[in-house]
Image (cartoon, rainbow, N blue to C red):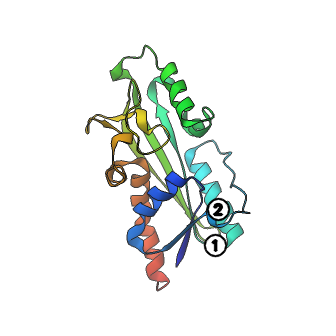
Amino acid sequence: MRELILCTRNHHKIIELQDLLRALFLSLKSLDDFPSFPQPPEDGQTFEENATAKALHSSLALKQWCLADDSGLEVEALGGRPGILSARYAETNPERIARLLRELEGIPPLKRTARFVCAMSLSDPEGNVVVRTGYCHGMIALEPRGTNGFGYDPVFHLPQLGKTMAELALDEKNHISHRANAARHLIPIIEKVIDNTGV
């Protein structure tokens, strides 16, 4: 493996993944490098199913090693919503956050527990797939704070740090995030692949 395709066109995800994987010294591309390639399917019932489908579809079509993730927010008081529908909860990030806060109106701070979930899947050109899942636990803030990150980061409060995810610098976020924790499980596997192919 000399090259790894990141199966996303989400600019924020690409930046985070490039930072998380920089120590591997691989050539990293994204689906932006394949403009005619259709967006992989996301019709599974779990984060793991969606991540696996995206990685498998891309690796078989492009004949390359591919890394995909599917991630979202689960809020305990909402029965796990928005879950796998996190990116489809509304049209824009501000609208998604506004809907979430509306649905949590009247819920006391200590009952606003939540977690970010990231399933990350690695597939080789033959379609052999491994998937790992990472989590980050926190609370939903009463209002947005911070301008970094993306998605629900401005309302995801980290009690141990006294900040929202959007108030963290990238290197801070990539120590504790759900995406970072999923990547930590996969990096040793990628390193073995690199060693076995002499890269």
| Residue 92 percent across, percent down from the top left | 59, 36
Looking at this view, is 189 or 179 the one in front?
A: 179
Q: Earlier in the sequence, mark 1 or mark 2?
A: 2
Residue denoted by label 2:
56
Residue at 56%, 30% (x, y): give it: 95
| Residue 100 percent across, percent down from the top left | 51, 26
**The image quarter in which residue 164 lies:** top left
Q: Which class describes the residues within 10 Å of circle 2: few (<14), some (14-19), or many (20+)?
A: many
Q: Which class describes the residues within 10 Å of circle 1: few (<14), some (14-19), or many (20+)?
A: some
Number of marks in the rendered image: 2
Does the rendering let one see residue 43?
yes
Q: Amino acid at mark 1?
A: Pro
Q: Which mark is residue 46?
A: none
Looking at this view, is 167 or 131 the one in front?
A: 167
Does 167 appear above or below 169?
Answer: above
| Residue 20 percent across, percent down from the top left | 41, 61
Does 108 appear above or below 162?
Answer: above
Q: Which mark is residue 125?
A: 1
**The image quarter in which residue 88 lies:** top right
| Residue 2 percent across, percent down from the top left | 52, 79
CA separation in Å, label 1 and label 2: 8 Å
Residue at 54%, 58% (x, y): give it: 121
Does 107 appear above or below 16?
Answer: above
**In the image as oriented, which residue stretches furthest toward the bottom?**
198
**Circles 1, 2 touching at the beta carbon (< 8 Å):** no
Q: Secondary structure at mark 2?
A: helix
Q: Amino acid at mark 2?
A: Leu
Does the rendering let one see residue 81?
no
Q: Secondary structure at mark 1?
A: loop
**The image quarter in which residue 185 lies:** bottom left
Residue at 65%, 45% (x, y): give it: 44
